[in-house]
Image: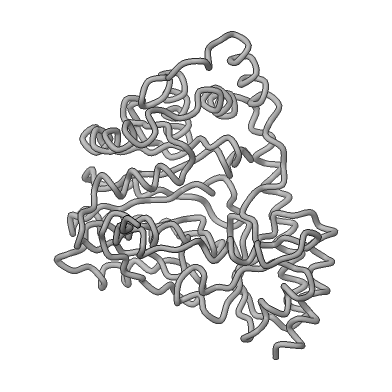
Amino acid sequence: MPNFSDRVERISISGIREVFEAAGDDAINLGLGQPDFPTPDHARQAAVDAIEAGKADAYTENKGTQSLREAIAEKHRTDQGVDLDPGNVIATAGGSEALHIALEAHVDAGDEVLIPDPGFVSYDALTKLTGAEPVPVPLRDDLTIDPAAIEDAITDDTEAFVVNSPGNPTGAVSSEADVREFARIADEHDVLCVSDEVYEYTVFDGEHYSPMEFAETDNVVVVNSASKLFSMTGWRLGWVYGSAERVDRMLRVHQYAQACASAPAQYAAEAALRGDRGVVDEMTASFERRRDLLLDGFDDIGIDCPTPQGAFYAMPRVPEGFVDECLDRGVVVVPGEAFGEGGRGHARISYATDESELREALDVMADAYEAAK
């Protein structure tokens, strides 16, 4: 039997997936990071129109259609004030591919990549697939990313650091001051900042800021996606942008791994970006109500949880055995250690589910908490 690469042997199936497979078919799923809203009608219709007109039958440009990249550039000019050239955007197969090509294009074997701990599971795995070493950086007690901790962790081998706001699995939102520091660190230390901004529109308290707004060099690459912004997870359409030189290198990876993003999804995403944003406000207001419902329930149970300021995740501190007790009672939650050693003693709760199920789940979590104490 042929041997397997050392890189692939260093990673395993996500702990999130393992929890799903352990749950029953009728379980309440608080583990899935997916909005429970339909894709906007105008986005769906744009894909249908493109298919019926024969516009989706062939490859697009490797970077994506010009009109989509113009829509993405307009979005970032409007939202962040970033003067983005559409030529410096690559449409990707979701934010996941965007992260992958950003790291593949910039990181060598033996390099170090600083990642938040706890942080999104892909940061560790994708770093290992490049042959580089992920270096976990602990979060503050409120689960925000600490720029000082990032700066302290930089060594001669550090090639990049990853930031994520609003955050998965924490729901934390970085302040403007912290984001300015991320940009300064990238500039002064000449390391790449990979900014994962896929939850950009889901902010309840404060505002979203991007390191790209404040960087004085080209040492920032931004990853974003239609998946969470417009409830389009299944369409697999994301994007990455940066300087022309960085985009050229990322395009080399994208060209051979993917050729181009799905054509129907590109037309759908363009329509979502250009069309009515009412669904965005509706989703954000709904997730904020659910967050408050969840936090009130945690208070009643006696569970301590930093207040999430965005996304649709909470990361409460829980006793050992809590996750298993929830699973045994038919509620799927994810153990915090699935997101790094810094998540141990926590659980990640996704409240992207309807309020009636959330109330039912809180009743179950109360019993699980008592059983695990």
Q: Residue at x 40, y 42 (%)?
A: 98
Q: Residue at x 35, y 50 (%)?
A: 211
Q: Is residue 77 visible?
A: yes
- In this rendering, position of residue 74 left or right of residue 234: left
Picture coordinates of residue 281, whole percent (x, y): 67, 41
Q: Is residue 127 visible?
A: no
Which of the image's four quarters has the N terminus?
A: bottom left
* Residue furthest left as drawn: 156
Picture coordinates of residue 51, whole percent (x, y): 60, 15
Rendering quarter of residue 20: bottom right
Picture coordinates of residue 128, whole percent (x, y): 32, 60
**Residue 89 or residue 140, whichever sits in front:** 89
- In this rendering, position of residue 294 left or right of residue 128: right
- In this rendering, position of residue 132 left or right of residue 55: left
Which of the image's four quarters has the C terminus?
A: bottom right
Q: Residue at x 58, y 35 (%)?
A: 235
* Residue furthest top as drawn: 53
Rendering quarter of residue 283: top right
Picture coordinates of residue 250, whole percent (x, y): 29, 38
